[in-house]
Image (spheres, rainbow, N blue to C red):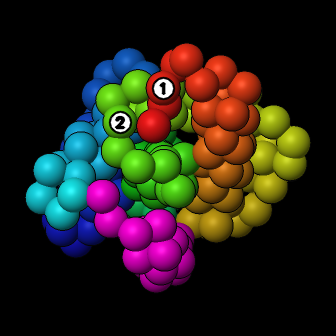
């Protein structure tokens, strides 16, 4: 079970005593940066395929985290933030401005849980844990797309 705990807590970042979701998103940002440094800009199609392949295992791992910690949607489970952030930066070539904008927007959307995230997070188990972060990632991605078109001087690319 130890390896599942490492995964669902984002390398134990979920145990950070304050703002564990932010700590998990920092891990996601670090993973995103490492992915870029190792592989360069990877095709959006490859990234989309990786995300699609990870959804089911992430649901199962979030289920395991909920059972292990004994509460619904425990704060310590941050794998959902990691997958949500991966969605937030999908379609965008690596750029520090984009990465930081995605970090901030993703945290805002994850905290405020705009429609339909708040309603859907009531789903049972890992799906309920993951769905609001998937929605936050999608909203973040759209927000960055809009900003890149309306404010080209920000050079988010």
Across and down, in percent, residue 124 comes to 70, 65
- The residue under label 2 is 95
Q: Farthest residue in the left direction?
A: 38
Residue drawn at (30%, 48%), measured in percent from left and top? 32
Q: Secondary structure at mark 2?
A: loop
Q: Viewer-proximal residue, 29 or 81? A: 29
Tell me, yes or no, if residue 77 can be seen here.
no
Q: Secondary structure at mark 1?
A: loop
Considering only vertical position in the picture, is 124 above or below 23? Answer: below
Q: Which mark is residue 155?
A: 1
Considering only vertical position in the picture, is 155 above or below 126? Answer: above
Q: Viewer-proximal residue, 128 or 145? A: 145
Q: In which quadrant of the rendered view does residue 65 lie?
A: bottom left
Magenta highlight range:
41-59
Q: Give left or right: position of 157 versus 38.
A: right
Q: Is residue 49 magenta?
A: yes
Q: In which quadrant of the rendered view does residue 28 lie?
A: top left
């Amino acid at each position: 079970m130890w390896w599942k705990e490492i995964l669902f807590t984002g390398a134990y970042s979920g145990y950070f005593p304050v703002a564990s979701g932010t700590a998990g998103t920092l891990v996601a940002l670090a993973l995103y940066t490492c992915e870029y440094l190792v592989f360069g800009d990877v095709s959006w199609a490859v990234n989309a395929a990786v995300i699609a392949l990870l959804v089911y295992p992430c649901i199962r791992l979030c289920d395991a985290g909920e059972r292990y910690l004994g509460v619904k949607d425990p704060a310590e489970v941050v794998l959902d933030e990691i997958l949500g952030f991966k969605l937030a930066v999908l379609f965008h070539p690596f750029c520090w401005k984009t990465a930081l904008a995605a970090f901030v927007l993703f945290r805002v959307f994850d905290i405020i849980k705009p429609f339909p995230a708040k309603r859907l997070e009531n789903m049972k188990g890992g799906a309920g844990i993951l769905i609001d972060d998937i929605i936050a990632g999608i909203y973040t991605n759209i927000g960055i797309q809009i900003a890149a078109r309306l404010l080209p001087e920000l050079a988010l690319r």
